[in-house]
Image (spheres, grey):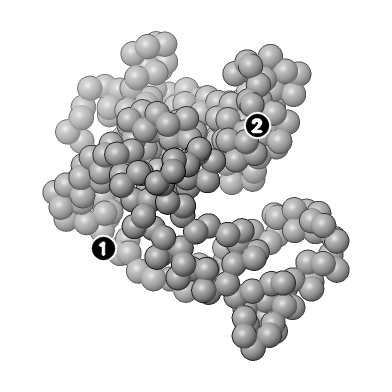
């Protein structure tokens, strides 16, 4: 076990202990989640708070911990449920990072990389890792699904994706993302046969609007090669679709106050948030800040031919 991971574990347990001492009553949305989990722990599966809009995956996890490790369903122990998933997050993020970097992961699961530990300290994950919320367990199962799909274990990846949907319904998108990214990597690094076709997939920085058309045109040529891996994900889609039909919509519980809608300002929130936390990465590229500003200028005020679609 690496020293950095030991320090990370000590920090998690210490923060959880401090939170339980200072915030000794349910906080924010915990007044809804905690009684629901305690009802499950007492064997009352018929009770459901109509104000809860997410599936019961979090409560089932706490119930399993109670059965397996004799956890009591008190507020501190319920919060420990999410903190345990926060402790496991660097392990799966290490595998995910190695997949995208095309490098071999560490031999031991208990030796996550330093950058995966830093990613686990991301403010949103870190904050909700000490409260009885669905965010961190949901994230953990999504990352696990992407990692297992990258290892070509698609049935397991689909199951993990389905489990993630029991925490957040919208994780169905990330389950499909796991399939798509694994197949893109497969098509990119596979050893092509004599009669196999290639997917047109240029680097994003070099792509133009014409490349998008070429990519779509080349897709039918590789579909038969990647469709078999889609079978388990298709079953997950069928289960998800059936649940939506049975429920009368995606949202559980309080549907009147949770109507899906296109929210344009959310796009600007995302860009602001991503820029605020990602500026070290943005300025660390080749050429530093001047090169970054030049790329931005060319994308906005580029040539008439390429406009915002090309950077040369």
- Tell me the tag on residue 103: 2
- Position of 292 with respect to 107 (left or right) is right
- Tell me the tag on residue 238: none
Q: Secondary structure at mark 1?
A: loop
Q: Quadrant of residue 93?
A: top right
Q: Which is more foreground, mark 1 or mark 2?
A: 2
Residue 126: tell me if it is visible: no
Of the 4 image quadrants, the one containing the N terminus is: top right
User: Which residue is outermost to the left?
Assistant: 246
- Position of 296 with respect to 161 (left or right) is right
Residue 101: x and y, percent?
A: 65, 39
Q: Residue at x 35, y 69 (%)?
A: 261
User: Which residue is outermost to the bottom?
Assistant: 304
Q: Earlier in the sequence, mark 1 or mark 2?
A: 2
Q: Secondary structure at mark 2?
A: loop
Q: Is residue 122 above or below residue 260?
A: above
Q: How many marks?
A: 2
Of the 4 image quadrants, the one containing the C terminus is: bottom right
Nearer-the-camera pick, 306 or 81: 306
Q: Residue at x 47, y 26 (%)?
A: 81
Q: Residue at x 47, y 22 (%)?
A: 77
Nearer-the-camera pick, 98 or 140: 98
Residue 241: x and y, percent?
A: 21, 49
Residue 33: x and y, percent?
A: 37, 38
Identify the residue position indicated by label 1 in the image. 256
Crowdedness of circle 1 by 10 Å Cα count: few (<14), some, many (20+)? few
Q: Are marks 1 and 2 in contact (CB under 8 Å)?
A: no
Residue 250: tell me if it is visible: yes
Q: CA distance from mark 1 to mark 2?
A: 48 Å
Residue 288: x and y, percent?
A: 85, 60
Q: Residue at x 29, y 39 (%)?
A: 228
């Amino acid at each position: 076990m690496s020293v950095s991971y030991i320090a990370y574990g000590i920090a998690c347990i210490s923060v959880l202990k401090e939170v339980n001492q200072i915030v000794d009553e349910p906080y924010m949305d915990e007044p809804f989640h905690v009684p629901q989990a305690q009802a499950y722990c007492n064997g009352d599966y018929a009770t459901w708070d109509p104000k809860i809009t997410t599936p019961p995956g979090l409560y089932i996890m706490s119930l399993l911990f109670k059965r397996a490790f004799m956890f009591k369903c008190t507020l501190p122990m319920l919060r420990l449920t999410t903190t345990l998933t926060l402790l496991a997050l660097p392990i799966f993020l290490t595998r995910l990072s190695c997949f995208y970097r095309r490098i071999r992961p560490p031999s031991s699961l208990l030796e996550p990389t330093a950058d995966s530990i830093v990613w686990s300290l991301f403010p949103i994950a870190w904050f909700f890792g000490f409260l009885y919320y669905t965010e961190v367990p949901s994230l953990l199962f999504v990352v696990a699904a992407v990692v297992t799909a990258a290892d070509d274990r698609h049935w397991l990846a689909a199951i993990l994706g389905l489990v993630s949907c029991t925490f957040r319904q919208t994780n169905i998108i990330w389950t499909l993302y796991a399939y798509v990214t694994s197949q893109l990597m497969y098509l990119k690094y596979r050893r092509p046969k004599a009669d196999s076709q290639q997917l047109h997939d240029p680097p994003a920085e070099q792509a133009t609007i014409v490349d998008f058309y070429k990519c779509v045109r080349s897709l039918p040529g590789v579909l038969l090669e990647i469709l078999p891996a889609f079978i388990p994900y298709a079953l997950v889609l069928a289960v998800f679709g059936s649940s939506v039909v049975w429920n009368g919509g995606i949202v559980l519980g309080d549907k009147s106050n949770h109507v899906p809608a296109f929210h344009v300002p959310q796009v600007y929130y995302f860009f602001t948030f991503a820029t605020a936390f990602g500026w070290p990465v943005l300025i660390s590229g080749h050429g530093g800040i001047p090169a970054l500003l030049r790329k931005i200028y060319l994308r906005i005020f580029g040539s008439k031919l390429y406009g915002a679609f090309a950077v040369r």
